[in-house]
Image (spheres, helix red, strand yellow):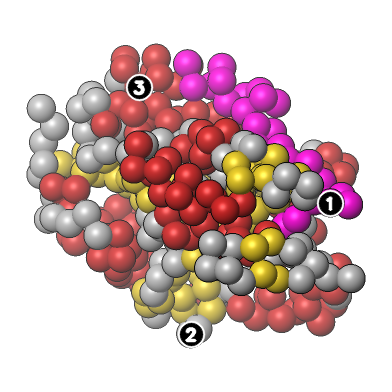
Amino acid sequence: MRDPHTLRVIDTGLRRAAENLALNRALLEAHQEGASPHTLRFLRFTPCALVGFHQSVEQELRLDYCQEQGIDIQRRITGGGAIYFDPTQIGWELYLDKRFLGTAEMPLIAQRICEAAARGISALGVDARFRPRNDIEVDGRKVSGTGGAFDGDSILYQGTLLIDFDVERMLRVLRIPAEKLSDKAISSARERVANLKDLLGELPSFETVQQRLAHSFAEAFDVNLEWNDVLNPTEERGFAEALLELDTPEWIFQHHRPAAEAGMLEGLHKSPGGLMRAALALDHARDRIKQVWITGDFFVKPGRTVVDLEASLRDTPVQELESNIRQFFARNRAEMLMLSPDDFLTVLRNALAKTTVAFPSGGATERPS
């Protein structure tokens, strides 16, 4: 039985991306099973680029640059967008449950955790504030980004604190338009983020940062801290099993989707839960959807929900798209963070809007010439 009044604190040190993400899964699964205490984990990464669970590596990252620079590529076990990590950032993660936080509403959870983190960062000598939806800023400049995900009753909430971050390298890792790599654009990006080294005039020690954050969380949650870097046997087994699966090309590139080509229809949808992308192959003669690929920085559990949805929509008549999507979600229980079946329908309709398709309402859109 876990103690609701104690927060274990562990520092798993500087590790490769695959090891850090394997620890993610091991700790989250053990917590969900009741085999782990409520935990605050500190972590650091060797240089790496991470994509969210539902994203396409080829679509989000510059693979050639990563390979040239020796930057690892990995896929997170949660949703969210592509990010760059290196040893100049401190990661922090909370493994808690809904009863511990007193709510299952992610906006309220984000506010409570981010306000506590902001107080910890402020204790270092800056004026850090929570900026909804999930950022922490100093004088309008982002110093920490955060995000969370549910797994049953367990909640994994993650944050990244910028200590001495290389913004230009991040921009070159991510697949963004070339114009955003100009000197002016890089200078503008630097102005939107804040490093603790620059704000404080010196490089704070990782130990000091961890102490300030940990004590702020303890005060916010009214719990005692228990510093213990030793994983229990359940967590150790979970880590070893997860590493075998995650440290493979099959895991990293599992959401590979074909590059856009003639006849491939693509659509975007900025949903409340994140940016969604859809690629769609259409049989024009029969007015049927042959195959869809859905990617993006959203959060859905179980992880294979999107893959199963894609499979269920193969060879779907366009006129039956809406009913098939609604039937799928009626049959399959899914936890979706600020998403609904309507969002999946919208992103696919946005792709279909690139051709002449008669929707059930009787309207049609013209294929661009």
Residue 196 in the image: x percent, y percent? 53, 68
Disc 2 is placed on an element classified as loop
Residue 224 in the image: x percent, y percent? 14, 46
Q: Residue at coordinates 76% horizontally, 71% vertically from top-left?
A: 366
Name the residue that disc number 1 marks. 263
User: How far is disc 2 from disc 3 in space, using C-alphas?
Assistant: 40 Å
Q: Which residues are magenta?
A: 241-269
Q: Quadrant of the C terminus?
A: bottom right
Instruction: Tell me if mark 1 has few (under 14), some (14-19) or many (20+) residues whose alpha carbon lies within 10 angstroms of its own.
Output: few
Disc 1 is placed on an element classified as loop
Residue type, label 2:
Asp
Between 365 and 208, the residue placed more toward the observer is 365
In the displayed structure, 87 sits above or below 27; it is below
Looking at the image, tell me whether mark 2 or mark 3 is earlier in sequence order: 2
The question of residue 229 being in magenta is answered with no
Between 295 and 25, the residue placed more toward the observer is 295
Between 99 and 297, the residue placed more toward the observer is 297
Name the residue that disc number 3 marks. 235
Instruction: Tell me if mark 3 has few (under 14), some (14-19) or many (20+) residues whose alpha carbon lies within 10 angstroms of its own.
Output: many
Disc 3 is placed on an element classified as helix
